Image (spheres, rainbow, N blue to C red):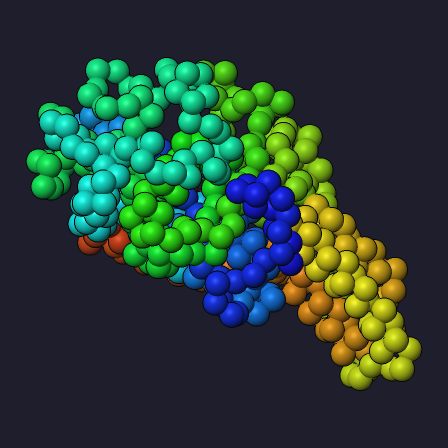
Amino acid sequence: MKLYNTMSKKKEEFLPLEEGKVKMYVCGPTVYNYIHIGNARPMIVFDTVRRYFEYKGYEVNFVSNFTDVDDKIIKKANEEGVTAEEISKRYIEECKKDMAAMNVKPATKNPLATEEIGGMIDMIQTLIEKGYAYEKNGTVYFHTRNFEGYGKLSHKNLDDLQSGGRSLLVSGADEKEDALDFVLWKPKKEGEPAWTSPWGEGRPGWHIECSEMSKKYLGEQIDIHAGGEDLVFPHHENEIAQSEAANGKEFAKYWMHNGFLNIDNRKMSKSLGNFFTVREISEKYDLQVLRFFMLSAHYRSPLNFSADLMEAAKNGLDRIVTAASNLKFLHENANTQEMTEKEKELFASTEKYVRQFEAAMEDDFNTADAISAIFELVKFINTQTSGENSKEFLEKLLERLVKLTDVLGILVEQEEQMLDADIEALIEERQLARKEKNFARADEIRNDLLAKGIVLEDTREGVKWKRA
Ligand code: AMP
Ligand code: ZN
């Protein structure tokens, strides 16, 4: 299996640190709002990478953090007059709902930065003791020039950074010894969350969070570290400096970065008015369509989002789902059980689509080509199956199709619809709850139904419901 390593700028053969296991860390979102469709790209892409490793028989330890202490969270909390914790808790919950709807598997662990402060303080201490960090008036800085390999991931050289990137690196009136130094710990400002540390009350810098959480949940050395390409510099470069300086070992063997998602060929931004949250997209499309759309391009290429491309993704996905449901229909109505010799041969001939799918995935997770292999299998299903086939043949074809679509996290088997009687029983229970002034339960029922696509409307004639 080959994957592109940002560190070497080459496709490399994947060799795990430990036989049969993959340790993988993906930088997660900062939770101050609903996630946008750009944030969804690394979630979908690296979930697919994980799924392919699992398909190959690896045990994957998949860790992805939530950055739940940050200027943007504090700003939002101040605007709403609530605590930063309330904001981050709310949007972590909302993010998990979006991830579930995109069929992103839950991580082995989702550490929260605010729950790992002790470990971060220890790591900063180690860096100070080893001569890589220093404190000035409550701020701790990493002494970038003391780490020899600085710049090796982003392929930048220190002197270019010093001159060219000055404005980027110097953050106002601070007291760092060198413009290249970055913050590990910052002192408390009025109205901000803070923790006690040897350098006074304050909070950690963003980069140290990931170095510590990766170490705590995966160990000092990991196989894959991943995120969007904007994280290469400075975030991942700084993570490498911190982790390797503190642990004295190579941090991650492979660095994977997804390309950016643009909208109508422009950078997505609130000010341009071309900004979509995943939640907004879910009002128009099943999020399976968004997932399919994301995987229709190579993960390292820029990806353009547009209404036309989403329609094309919807049609493509429909073709696969229809083939699966036709197979199920034929299977239910088939008259014979076992495969004939001819069917055995035909089934064996579909093995080539599996090989084609795997070859695409083994070539740096080329999901676009993997989807083409699935379409070829779909074409085979559409042209080679009929009411004459045996149950076994139809079942095996469906199994083969589902096995491949599962790797991409694409669900082809539609969920059972809720029965009318079950809906009405819940509505009755809700009415009763309201009568008893148990509004919490009443709201819960309304929300549960909504999650299943059932919308309630309170009218003068009573409660009406419809399927959304
Ligand atoms: P953030 O919350 O900004 O730290 O972003 C969380 C993840 O989303 C990071 O891996 C970013 O690189 C990624 N990301 C943010 N915007 C985009 C975008 N427009 N396209 C692709 N990935 C993005
Ligand atoms: Zn990170």
Where 143 sits versus 209, above or below? above
Q: Measured from the top left, where is residue 93 in percent x and y?
A: 34, 46
- Residue 324 vs residue 423: left or right? right
Relative horizontal placement of residue 163, taking residue 301 as reference (left or right): left
Q: Quadrant of residue 390?
A: bottom right
Image vertical order of residue 43 relative to residue 373, above or below: above
Where does the N terminus fall, quadrant-wise? bottom right
| Residue at 9% over, 41% down | 198
Which residue in the rendered view is the most extreme toward the bottom? 338
Q: Position of residue 2 (x, y in %)?
A: 64, 54
**Residue for point 67% across, 61% down:** 404
Residue 266 screen position, x and y as percent? 58, 20
The residue that appears at 77% across and 77% down in the rendered structure is 391
Using the rendered image of the protein, determine whether residue 121 is visible from the camera's viewpoint.
no
- In the image, 245 versus 92, the foreground residue is 245
Residue at the image position 63 percent from the left and 44 percent from the top = 10
84 displayed left or right of 108 = left
The answer to whether residue 404 is visible is yes
Q: Position of residue 85 (x, y in %)?
A: 21, 40
188 versus 41 height, above or below: above
Q: Exactly how many numbered labels are in the figure? A: 0
